[in-house]
Amino acid sequence: MTFLLLFFEFFKTGLFAIGGGLATLPFLYEIADKYPWFRAEIIPDMIAISESTPGPIGVNMSTYAGYNAGFEIAGVLGGILGAATATIGLITPSVIVILIVAQFLKRFRDSKIVKDVFYTLRPAVTGLIACACFTTMNGSLFFTDALKSFSGAADLLQIFNLPAILLFAVILTGILKLKKVHPIVFILVAALVGIVLKF
Amino acid sequence: MFMDKKASLLDLFLTFARIGGFTFGGGYAMLPMLQKEVVEEKKWTTEEELLDYYAVGQCTPGIIAVNVATFIGQKTRGVIGGIIATLGVVAPSFVIILAIASVINRFSEITIVAHALAGIRVAVAALIVSAIIKLWKKGIKDLLGIIIFAAVVLLSLLLNVSPIIIVVVAMLFGIVYGRAAGKGEKK
């Protein structure tokens, strides 16, 4: 049953995550919410792993989630089976769609309806990724949980993690200005800062 | 089977596994390697077709790397070729993540690793923000785009609307809006 669910959930992700790796993020947060396969906190770690190892984030996350889910049932072997199930679930929709689209490639590329769809879909996907980004930041850059016990300006420091926000600003500037530097470099720098400042 | 000079299935699998195993940072990082291996050396496809595949791969569901692999595989060896090339391109990351998945849970409890991961999360947030800036520049060109963006943020963050619903509604709205705007199409 778990294996069927794994296949189905990642099939859905593969079908509706349009526009590259990060488009899978909102779906991954939803899966983390609904199932015990992985915790939401692991998603940023997996993004970092995906940036530092070959392979797309979607494939990496489905492999990881499938391994965890299968491991609960039948140990390492179940883990491997689960990983394969989830990953195949993720790539099945795109393989089917591409095999169909390949039959009329030029017409698809120039079609007005495709242009129309993307005119409104692009801002929507950008919005979805922005929300996933907010979730990623919550708990490391700021803590919305602390808002509940908010009583005055002194509590602001409980809500905002100032050293982390400073590091964020420096790294974001670095990424935007130094376009040739590989993301791994920024990830390593942040890891070092995290160790030195005991984040 | 062996008479086919275009591509053996094993060659397809291994070529795409090599490409998948050496590209860090997603689909676009793959393009130079595809140009060299698949266009220049193996001649499985042409430069123009490869760019077409990329353009279409962005507009169809799924990961761009997988989409391009399916296109090239199916062009050389039909449906089976498409499936084999796709399995090839995901195989390396599958194996690497399996190895990481089996150790990461124990690994992340070590204090120094926990500090490093906390730092890394900040860098990841910055990487996503830079990606959002790029997406914004590419995809949001007028007031309607900004309104859709804001509406999605509100629906998703405050009302917890499922991303599937948002994606489907945005697509349908695009079709309806495109029809309505009809003759006045700016492009």
Image (cartoon, rainbow, N blue to C red):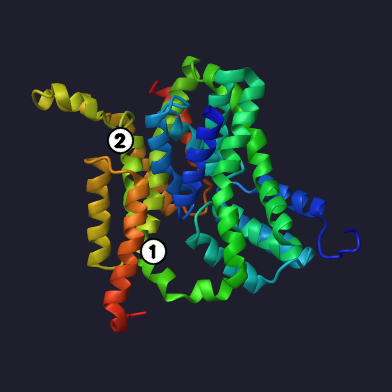
Q: Position of residue A3 (x, y in %)?
A: 56, 31
Disc 1 on helix, strand or loop? helix
Chain of the residue on which disc 2 is drawn: A
Q: Quadrant of the C terminus of chain A?
A: top left
Q: Is residue A121 left or right of residue B48?
A: left
Residue at horizontal 60%, vertical 52%? Answer: B66
Label 2: how many Cα within 10 Å (few below 14, some 14–19, many 20+): some
Residue at horizontal 68%, vertical 42%? Answer: B91
Q: Is residue A32 left or right of residue A183?
A: left
Q: CA distance from mark 2 to mark 1?
A: 27 Å
Q: Hey, what amino acid is under mark 2?
A: Ile
Residue at horizontal 45%, vertical 54%? Answer: A18
Q: Which mark is residue B138?
A: 1
Task: Relative to A145, say whether B161 is above or below.
Answer: below
Q: Is residue A2 left or right of residue B160?
A: right
Res B63 seen here: yes
Q: Position of residue A167 (x, y in %)?
A: 36, 36
In the picture as drawn, the residue positioned furthest to the bottom comes out as: B183
Disc 2 on helix, strand or loop? helix
Q: Hey, what amino acid is under mark 1?
A: Lys
Looking at the picture, tell me which residue is in the foreground, A150 or B54: B54
Res B140 seen here: no
Please tell me whether mark 2 or mark 1 is closer to you in this view. 1
Task: Find disc 2 in the rendering and name its residue.
Answer: A165
